[in-house]
Image (spheres, helix red, strand yellow):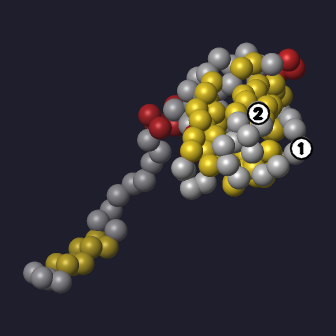
Amino acid sequence: MAFLRDSPRVVNCFNFTVAENPELAQSRPAAIKIVPVMKETSVQVGERFKLRFKVIDSNSNQPKADIEDVGVLVFLAPGIWQQREVAKPAAGGEYEISFVPPQAGVYYVFFQSPSLGFRFNQLPPLTLQALEK
Protein backbone atom coordinates (compact mmCIF):
# COMPACT_ATOMS: atom_id res chain seq x y z
CA MET A 1 0.00 0.00 0.00
CA ALA A 2 1.32 3.41 -0.91
CA PHE A 3 1.06 6.15 1.73
CA LEU A 4 1.47 9.84 0.93
CA ARG A 5 1.12 12.75 3.33
CA ASP A 6 1.62 16.35 2.26
CA SER A 7 2.58 18.07 5.50
CA PRO A 8 5.04 17.05 6.76
CA ARG A 9 5.94 15.33 3.51
CA VAL A 10 6.01 11.54 4.02
CA VAL A 11 6.03 8.90 1.29
CA ASN A 12 6.22 5.21 2.14
CA CYS A 13 5.06 1.84 0.83
CA PHE A 14 3.86 -0.91 3.15
CA ASN A 15 3.61 -4.63 2.45
CA PHE A 16 0.60 -6.46 3.84
CA THR A 17 -1.37 -9.65 3.31
CA VAL A 18 -5.12 -9.86 2.78
CA ALA A 19 -6.83 -12.97 4.14
CA GLU A 20 -10.36 -14.09 4.94
CA ASN A 21 -11.46 -13.60 8.54
CA PRO A 22 -12.07 -17.19 9.78
CA GLU A 23 -14.77 -16.01 12.21
CA LEU A 24 -16.76 -14.42 9.38
CA ALA A 25 -16.37 -17.51 7.19
CA GLN A 26 -18.04 -19.64 9.89
CA SER A 27 -21.00 -17.29 10.27
CA ARG A 28 -22.05 -17.26 6.60
CA PRO A 29 -25.79 -17.63 6.21
CA ALA A 30 -27.31 -20.57 4.41
CA ALA A 31 -27.98 -20.11 0.70
CA ILE A 32 -31.73 -19.45 0.88
CA LYS A 33 -34.35 -17.96 -1.40
CA ILE A 34 -37.97 -17.06 -0.72
CA VAL A 35 -40.46 -18.13 -3.39
CA PRO A 36 -44.03 -16.80 -3.21
CA VAL A 37 -46.71 -19.42 -3.84
CA MET A 38 -49.28 -16.97 -5.19
CA LYS A 39 -48.90 -15.29 -8.57
CA GLU A 40 -50.98 -12.20 -7.78
CA THR A 41 -49.03 -9.16 -6.59
CA SER A 42 -51.97 -6.80 -6.10
CA VAL A 43 -54.12 -6.78 -2.98
CA GLN A 44 -57.26 -4.90 -1.91
CA VAL A 45 -57.12 -2.15 0.70
CA GLY A 46 -59.02 -3.14 3.84
CA GLU A 47 -59.22 -6.85 2.98
CA ARG A 48 -57.20 -9.57 4.70
CA PHE A 49 -54.47 -10.88 2.41
CA LYS A 50 -52.90 -14.28 3.05
CA LEU A 51 -49.30 -14.42 1.84
CA ARG A 52 -47.97 -17.95 1.28
CA PHE A 53 -44.36 -18.67 0.42
CA LYS A 54 -41.70 -21.37 0.48
CA VAL A 55 -38.20 -21.17 1.92
CA ILE A 56 -35.95 -22.90 -0.62
CA ASP A 57 -32.39 -24.17 -0.07
CA SER A 58 -30.55 -22.73 -3.08
CA ASN A 59 -27.96 -25.53 -3.09
CA SER A 60 -30.42 -28.44 -3.25
CA ASN A 61 -33.41 -26.48 -4.63
CA GLN A 62 -35.56 -28.22 -1.99
CA PRO A 63 -38.02 -26.53 0.39
CA LYS A 64 -37.02 -26.22 4.03
CA ALA A 65 -39.88 -27.32 6.27
CA ASP A 66 -40.59 -26.82 9.99
CA ILE A 67 -38.57 -23.65 10.51
CA GLU A 68 -39.92 -22.06 13.68
CA ASP A 69 -38.40 -18.58 13.39
CA VAL A 70 -39.23 -17.24 9.92
CA GLY A 71 -39.90 -13.58 10.66
CA VAL A 72 -41.79 -11.40 8.20
CA LEU A 73 -41.79 -7.60 8.03
CA VAL A 74 -44.44 -5.95 5.85
CA PHE A 75 -44.30 -2.21 5.41
CA LEU A 76 -45.97 0.46 3.32
CA ALA A 77 -43.41 2.55 1.46
CA PRO A 78 -41.87 4.83 2.61
CA GLY A 79 -42.21 3.11 6.00
CA ILE A 80 -45.34 4.85 7.31
CA TRP A 81 -47.03 1.57 8.37
CA GLN A 82 -45.54 -1.81 9.26
CA GLN A 83 -46.41 -5.22 10.63
CA ARG A 84 -44.01 -7.85 11.97
CA GLU A 85 -44.87 -11.46 12.73
CA VAL A 86 -43.54 -14.99 12.70
CA ALA A 87 -44.78 -17.04 9.75
CA LYS A 88 -46.83 -20.13 10.49
CA PRO A 89 -45.78 -23.41 8.85
CA ALA A 90 -48.39 -24.71 6.40
CA ALA A 91 -48.67 -27.87 4.30
CA GLY A 92 -46.02 -28.89 1.78
CA GLY A 93 -43.16 -26.88 3.26
CA GLU A 94 -45.06 -23.62 2.82
CA TYR A 95 -45.36 -20.78 5.32
CA GLU A 96 -47.99 -18.09 5.66
CA ILE A 97 -48.83 -14.77 7.21
CA SER A 98 -51.81 -12.51 6.76
CA PHE A 99 -52.27 -8.76 6.96
CA VAL A 100 -54.80 -6.08 6.07
CA PRO A 101 -53.34 -3.23 3.99
CA PRO A 102 -54.64 -0.01 5.57
CA GLN A 103 -54.22 2.16 2.48
CA ALA A 104 -53.30 2.06 -1.20
CA GLY A 105 -49.63 1.97 -2.10
CA VAL A 106 -46.58 -0.23 -2.49
CA TYR A 107 -45.87 -2.75 0.27
CA TYR A 108 -42.50 -4.43 0.74
CA VAL A 109 -42.22 -7.81 2.45
CA PHE A 110 -38.89 -8.77 4.02
CA PHE A 111 -37.91 -12.11 5.59
CA GLN A 112 -35.49 -13.31 8.25
CA SER A 113 -34.60 -16.50 10.11
CA PRO A 114 -31.97 -16.39 12.86
CA SER A 115 -31.70 -20.20 12.88
CA LEU A 116 -30.82 -20.21 9.17
CA GLY A 117 -28.55 -17.19 9.55
CA PHE A 118 -30.27 -14.59 7.38
CA ARG A 119 -31.62 -11.17 8.34
CA PHE A 120 -34.23 -8.83 6.86
CA ASN A 121 -31.62 -6.98 4.78
CA GLN A 122 -30.01 -10.07 3.22
CA LEU A 123 -32.73 -11.29 0.86
CA PRO A 124 -34.56 -9.34 -1.82
CA PRO A 125 -38.05 -8.27 -0.69
CA LEU A 126 -41.35 -9.18 -2.28
CA THR A 127 -43.32 -6.22 -3.61
CA LEU A 128 -47.10 -5.98 -3.42
CA GLN A 129 -49.42 -3.26 -4.71
CA ALA A 130 -52.49 -2.40 -2.63
CA LEU A 131 -55.38 -0.96 -4.61
CA GLU A 132 -58.63 0.75 -3.55
CA LYS A 133 -61.82 -1.22 -4.17
The residue at which mark 2 appears reads as 48
Q: Where does the N terminus fall, quadrant-wise?
A: bottom left
Depth check, front residue: 88 or 15: 88
Depth check, front residue: 61 or 100: 100
Q: Is residue 106 above or below residue 7?
A: above
Q: Where residue 77 sits: x, y (%)?
A: 61, 54
Q: Secondary structure at mark 2?
A: loop
Q: Residue at x 51, y 32 (%)?
A: 27
Q: Where residue 67 sits: x, y (%)?
A: 68, 19
Q: Residue at x 87, y 20 (%)?
A: 92
Judge from the rendering whether residue 117 lies leftward or rightward of residue 126; answer left or right.
left
Q: What numbered label is drawn on residue 39?
A: 1
Q: Amino acid at mark 1?
A: Lys
Q: Where residue 95 sits: x, y (%)?
A: 76, 25
Q: Residues within 10 Å of mark 1 (few under 14, many from 20)?
A: few
Q: Are the two marked residues, 2 and 1, in contact with CB atoms closer than 8 angstroms?
A: no
The image quadrant that residue 85 belongs to is top right
Q: Is residue 57 visible?
A: no
Spatial CA distance of label 2 from label 1 is 17 Å
Q: Is residue 20 above or below residue 52?
A: below
Depth check, front residue: 55 or 43: 43
How many discs appear? 2
